[in-house]
Image (tube, rainbow, N blue to C red):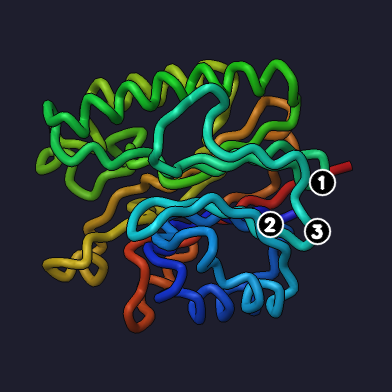
């Protein structure tokens, strides 16, 4: 089984890129973030033409998440239960015995800002939600744009970024706390090329210079991580015309 995650940064703009990538990289499911469109404008016909069924949780202009799969995802839950946050950032569903949680973690804007405080509080709520899911679903996979680079090796220039949003100590501590529930960063289970990133700013030739961050993650429960056979970042999409600033990440599993 192959599952991918990709922050498309506007599904409407990146729909052709998505189709091209899926044609070259067949997957059983893909989680998308930053749809930037309301549910009533979701391009269902175009997605179904790609051979995929979709569940989505979107809003106008900002945020939005979706799960596309060969078979219609089951037991879909939008948002975090009991959470009245109007920002649509989480969707969960079951696919082939895997409970898949797709998240778009808040950016945080700048350390100390109101949006940063919101991000840390949101991560606390996410941890509580994932703890409850792990108690119910041995095969849990949490994917998406976490807007946190886990370690300095996930940052092109740690000194330049030190103390900034995406790498600040409280953000990383929140991510460590989530991982401590029993979730493994699948990308780091395998030997990877140095300076592997999943996001590059549109400005200052960041992609050409490989000035990026690895902030798009796939975290798996122990039972599922042991069945992962590969996890890769496909940076080729970032070289397309009018690309998303993120690259897709894919994990393969040997599911018995």
Residue 100 placement (x, y as % from top left) = 66, 41
Q: Which mark is residue 29?
A: 2
* Most foreground residue, 114 or 30: 114
Residue wearing tag 3: 71
Q: Do tag 2 and tag 1 residues touch (Cβ < 8 Å)?
A: yes
Measured from the top left, where is residue 167 in percent x and y?
24, 34
Q: Secondary structure at mark 3?
A: loop
Q: Position of residue 207 (x, y in %)?
A: 26, 67
**Mark identifier at residue 96:** 1
Would you say residue 186 is visible in this rendering? no
Answer with left or right where residue 66 lies relative to residue 138. Answer: left
The outermost residue toward the front is 40
From this view, report whether residue 41 is shown above or below residue 159. below
Considering only order in the chain, which callout, 2 or 3, is on the residue closer to the N terminus?
Answer: 2
Earlier residue among tags 2 and 1: 2
Residue at horizontal 27 percent and vertical 55 percent from the top: 212
In which quarter of the view is residue 69 placed? bottom right
């Amino acid at each position: 089984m192959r599952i991918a995650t990709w922050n498309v940064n506007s599904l409407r703009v990146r729909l052709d890129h998505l189709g091209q990538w899926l044609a070259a990289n067949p997957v059983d499911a893909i989680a998308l973030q930053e749809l930037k469109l309301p549910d009533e404008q979701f391009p269902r016909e175009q997605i179904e033409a790609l051979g995929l069924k979709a569940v989505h949780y979107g809003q106008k202009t900002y945020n939005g998440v979706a799960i596309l799969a060969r078979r219609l995802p089951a037991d879909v839950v939008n948002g975090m239960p009991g959470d009245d946050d109007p920002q649509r950032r989480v969707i969960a569903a079951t696919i082939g015995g895997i409970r898949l949680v797709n998240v778009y973690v808040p950016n945080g804007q700048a350390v100390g800002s109101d949006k940063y405080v919101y991000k840390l509080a949101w991560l606390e709520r996410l941890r509580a939600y994932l703890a409850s899911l792990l108690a119910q679903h041995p095969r849990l996979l949490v994917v998406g744009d976490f807007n946190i680079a886990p370690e300095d090796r996930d940052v092109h220039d740690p000194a330049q970024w030190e103390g900034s949003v995406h790498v600040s100590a409280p953000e990383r501590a929140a991510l460590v706390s989530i991982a401590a529930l029993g979730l493994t960063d699948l990308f780091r289970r395998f030997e990877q090329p140095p300076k592997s990133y999943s996001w590059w700013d549109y400005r200052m030739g960041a992609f050409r210079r490989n000035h990026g961050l690895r902030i798009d993650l796939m975290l798996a429960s122990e039972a599922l991580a042991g069945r992962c056979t590969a996890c890769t970042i496909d940076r080729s999409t970032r070289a397309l015309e009018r690309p998303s600033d993120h690259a897709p990440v894919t994990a393969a599993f040997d599911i018995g």
